[in-house]
Image: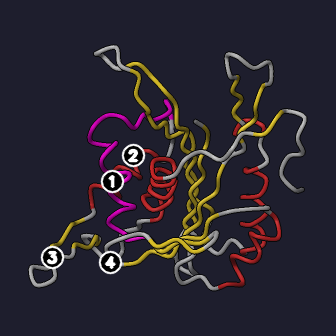
Amino acid sequence: MGFYVGVDLGKSADYTAVAVVEEAKESNLAGRVENTLHLRHLERYPLRTPYPEQADRIARLMRSEELISETRVPWEPTVYRQWPELVVDATGVGRAVTDLLRERNPWFRAVTITGGDAAIYSGPGASVPKRDLVAALEVPFHSGTLKVAEGLERWPALKAELLNFLRKINLKTSHDSYEHWRETDHDDLVLAAALACWWARSQAMMTPVPLSAVGPET
């Protein structure tokens, strides 16, 4: 359990969006404990915000004490800290931008979004089908296992983006893709939230470290 931060890096005419998702355990109506996702934070950076400034803002967010979760194993006296995990859409932005982030944050997973059939992992990077990312947000959204923080300002915009997506099936290849209804629609909030949900659900948590351990690089 812990926090996951998804970032969709915008190009010159696009917004950069940031989403924070918390994974938690809750009892459902049947009394069974299940993993749920809580959308805690959504934001867009103003258009044409310089990439160094964006990298600084993301780094500050990743060092926020509010995103450090604490757990205790019943048979151990030690309290463990779980640092948030960062997942970044690096599709088309170039290595220079991800290098700016890497200088400020000790670790993140750079994701290249593809039209393939399966995710491919390579060290700290990954190539992930867009349909997998969208499904990671769409499924909990419709099943009710995605909870939304009360008063989240960008939530209506995220819902509108998600509902504006159109799934098309290529009958010759059986591949599906996700597109906007209109070219002027944005998908930055969808992709930022989808990245966080995908990583939260598809990967095991990193090993927690004791409270006395050194935190992220500053």
Q: Which residue is the site of mark 1?
A: 160
Distance between the alpha carbons at the discs numbered 4 and 1: 14 Å
Q: Give whichever of discs 3 and 1 has the lower sequence position.
A: 1
Distance between the alpha carbons at the discs numbered 2 and 4: 20 Å
Q: Which residue is the site of mark 4?
A: 183
Q: Which residue is the site of mark 2?
A: 156
| Circle 3 SS class | loop
Which mark is in front, 3 or 1? 3
- Mark 4: amino acid: Glu
Which mark is in front, 4 or 3? 3
Range of residues picked out in magenta: 128-151
Q: Give whichever of discs 2 and 3 has the lower sequence position.
A: 2
Name the residue at 42% across, 69% down: 119
> Can you give x and y, in whole percent of width and height, for residue 95 in the image?
67, 84
Name the residue at 63% across, 71% down: 123
> Can you give x and y, in whole percent of width and height, for residue 10 in the image?
56, 73
- Does the residue at mark 2 contact the one at mark 1 (Cβ under 8 Å)? yes
Q: Quadrant of residue 147?
A: top left
- Mark 3: amino acid: Ser
- Mark 1: amino acid: Ala
Say if 54 sits above or below 214 in the image. Answer: below
Q: Quadrant of residue 48?
A: bottom right
Could you say which is closer to the camera, residue 114 or residue 144?
A: 114
Distance between the alpha carbons at the discs numbered 2 and 1: 6 Å
Mark 2 Cα shell of 10 Å, populated few (<14), some (14-19), many (≥20): few
